[in-house]
Image (cartoon, rainbow, N blue to C red):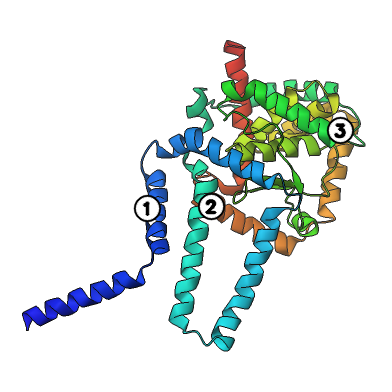
Amino acid sequence: MAKKRKLSTWAILRGLMKRVRIRHWILIVWIGTVLLFQQVEGWGEYYARHLYPTIGKALSSLSGKVDVCLSDTFYFLLIGLALLWIPISIWMLKRKKKRLLADFTEAALWLYVWFYSAWGLNYWQDNFYLRTGVGYVEYSSNSLGAYVSAYIYDLNDAYVPVEDIDSMLVKQEILKSYEAIYAQTGMNKPLNTDPQVKTMFITPLASMVAVTGSMGPFFGEFTINGEVLPVDYPHIYAHELSHLYGITSEGEANFYAYLACMHSDVPEIRFSGLLSVFSHLMNNVRTLMGESSYAHLIKQVRPEIRLLVRDRQAYWMDRYNPYIGKMQDLMYDFYLRQHRIEGGRKNYSAVVGLLMAWDERQKVSP
């Protein structure tokens, strides 16, 4: 009886082995490799520095040959297939629920390995401070106040009305900036000399949830909301391009966008960079220093800029849908926290600490 049971067990194993096809073995090995890169210390950094530049360059070069936004098209197709595939499989093809679940799970796992292999493993790279050796600065109300006062002086001095913006000039200037600063700021070398930014298919929906740009990890492409104001276009372009170069932290992307814009000699681009961190700095002033200090510093900002900030806020609020927006905020916050981005959506404001740490570094070794 024991022998018979043993043979039966072996027969079951052989049956299972026959059902596992070559693609399943590839998928299993691929998932295991992705998990190793996530769990083994240093492997995520190795991916970001040595593997991703080749992967990102290949994907962005291929997707750049197509004018259509592949990412948005892909998302629409996925949603459409999911909505159609389930009822068709159940009612028309009479497929069993277990088989349907197995197919769905396999498809999700292929997307999982594609996402992390193509870009997502960058979340496991070292942070800015480790990559650059720049020390973290514990800033006080006094040091923040001094920094913001100097910043406001530069902002006022840089003010220029921006009624229109040359997107090709922005592209050339930001690429030139990243080429000049990548080595000293802990970024990857720019992946290619002709990245193709694309306009979101879903621009109205993106505006409803206050999304001005995005990174398409599956195809190595980045997009910008078609309703972005000219004054914001340069820093949003630089922000999303930094994601293409492998930067995952939103605070770091804001920081790199600021540096890239400030490295340009074009007045409109420099002003866009300075304006991009205005709300983050002033929100920190209000939190750390109180309402009176906030009001005092706001009065130092020239009236044209204060009016511009109010008009920009009104512009986006007219398009914002609080119900859809809050849902998107919760989903994106959860996504960021699950991918090692401390603070979730609040990470955008981490740019303040990076700016002040960089400023201290420049004072020592400009």
Question: Which label number is shown at residue 32?
Answer: 1
Name the N-terminal-most of marks 1 and 3: 1
In terms of secondary structure, where does tag 3 sit?
helix
- Disc 3 residue type (three-letter): Ile
Mark 3 = which residue?
Answer: 305
> Which quarter shows the N terminus?
bottom left
Task: Check disc 1 and report its element: helix, strand or loop.
Answer: helix
Q: Quadrant of residue 58?
A: top right
Amino acid type, residue under disc 1 in the picture:
Gly
User: SS class of the residue under badge 2?
Assistant: helix
Q: Amino acid at mark 2?
A: Phe
Closer to the chain start, of discs 3 and 2, is: 2
Badge 2 crowding class, 10 Å Cα cut-off, few under 14, some 14 to 19, many 20 or more, is some
Residue 143 falls left or right of residue 302 = left
Q: Position of residue 324 (x, y in %)?
A: 71, 63
Q: Which residue occupies 24% across, 72% down?
A: 13
